[in-house]
Image (cartoon, grey):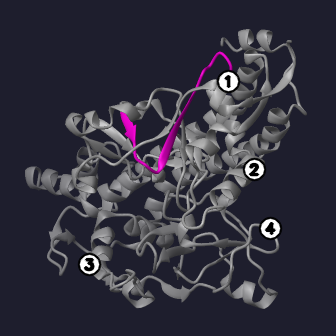
Amino acid sequence: MAGEWINFRLGDVCTKIGSGATPRGGSSVYLEHGDVALIRSQNVYNDGFHHDGLVYLTDMHAAQLANVEVEQHDILLNITGDSVARVCQVDPNVLPARINQHVAIIRTNPQHLWPRYLRYFLVSPAMQAHMRQLAGAGATRNALTKGMIESFSIPAPSDIKEQRAIAHILGTLDDKIELNRRMSRTLEQMARAIFKSWFVDFEPVRAKAAVRREHPTWTDDQVSRAACPKLKPEIAALFPDSFQDSELGEIPKGWGVKKLSDLCSTQYGYTTSAVDKPVGPKFLRVTDINKRNWIEWGDVPHCAIDRDTKEAYALKIGDLVVARMADPGKSAIIEEEIDAVFASYLVRLKTPSLAHSYYVYGFSKSDLYAEYAEGARSGSVQANMNAKVIVAASLVVPPTTVMEQFLRAVLPLRQRLVSNVCESRTLAALRDALLPKLISGELRVKDAERFLKEKGL
């Protein structure tokens, strides 16, 4: 009957439920690029498919896993370990793909259960708690078995059109969030490209030097205009047209070499426990800065802290934080007015101006600093960098006027990025409020067939 709400036993409405396997040779056969992707638990998150850590197999090794080939629309569920119960749909852009033994494929019969609807049901707070409880019932490691998954009871409209309509409403919000993330990644890459061009490759200086050699009698203005036509004249004029030797090799004439410690002070973070309830300020940790080049404040937990201590650790716009443990060298910059403090595995860097902050942040995200951090890490059990090591790196330092122009160039990009992140936070809150109401039947989609036609589905 149209409009009826029923419970499906998941095993009865799926054409496949099963986990994958590790190819012969294990991690030794993993490739950074290849013919077929191998999806592992680190790629499966409740907010979507993550490409970080994705590895590949040759066709030969993929053939050994032919029975766990991933298809478009498949649901991927983490079934073991600390990430148990995380779930998403496969990104079709990674296909062809296989899964390893820590991930299960759930492939629904779309005539009875719409895959995207199931995905939203599985990420609902109640179902997440249920799956984690089931997984933790064993004596050793958290695990969800095939039998457990098959027995899941899935409440859904009997009308597949209403399932599709619900999935579309929630999916539209997620699609906009993902679009914002892609735009933010592009904006970050643009800002990073400017830093590399100006302060690593010294492209404006090299261009002006070449023009000066060819036209030694030209004025500085003529050289700047000819060498840097894409830069505003007032910016191009700030770059010299020759180089000088330094301990870091050839650098622009008149620029210097300093330690990071000459540009900023350091402070270790606060030691306490994170809590999910909003009992105090946000509590920024390494895990909150090491996956993206911006901070998703909606995912950051809170902490209880007294007023005086909070003031000592309160984060301000322009502050930089750098991981000293867990993922040493990873960094982030504070770009929003936010009630937040930072954890003890982070070191705060404070600079004399916002221009200095964005310059130091650009350096901290460069390959130059990544190479330095890789060589500076110590610790036989866990790699770490103390505050002195973090700021012991040498870097080329331009005049403050050049840093200020860099700030003017990148700040609009970063502000658009922050705007995208804030909008996504609002959309995620709306999605999270709608999700339990839609999948429980508390909120219904009237005339789902007409709704789908209006959306061109």
Q: Amino acid at mark 2?
A: Pro
Q: Of discs 3 and 4, which sits in the foreground?
A: 4
Q: Which residues are magenta?
A: 97-114
Q: CA distance from mark 1 to mark 2?
A: 20 Å
- Residue type at tag 4: Lys
Which amino acid type is shown beneath numbered disc 3?
A: Gly
Q: Nearer the viewer, mark 1 or mark 2?
A: 1
Crowdedness near tag 3: few (<14), some (14–19) or many (≥20) residues, C-alpha within 10 Å: few
Work out whether residue 418 or residue 236 is closer to the camera in this orientation and state it: 418
Label at residue 125: 2
Q: Is residue 66 above or below residue 180?
A: above
Dot 3 corresponds to which residue? 375
> Disc 4 vs disc 1: which is toward the camera?
1
Q: Which residue is mark 4?
A: 277
Give me the C-alpha separation between circle 3 and circle 1: 52 Å
Residue corresponding to mark 1: 113
- Which is nearer the N-term, disc 3 or disc 1? 1
Q: Amino acid at mark 1?
A: Leu
- Residue 444, percent across and down? 87, 26
Question: Which numbered mark, 2 or 4, is in the foreground of this view?
Answer: 2
Q: Nearer the viewer, residue 93 or 23?
A: 23
Image position of 412 with respect to 452: above or below? below
Query: Which label is found at residue 210?
Result: none
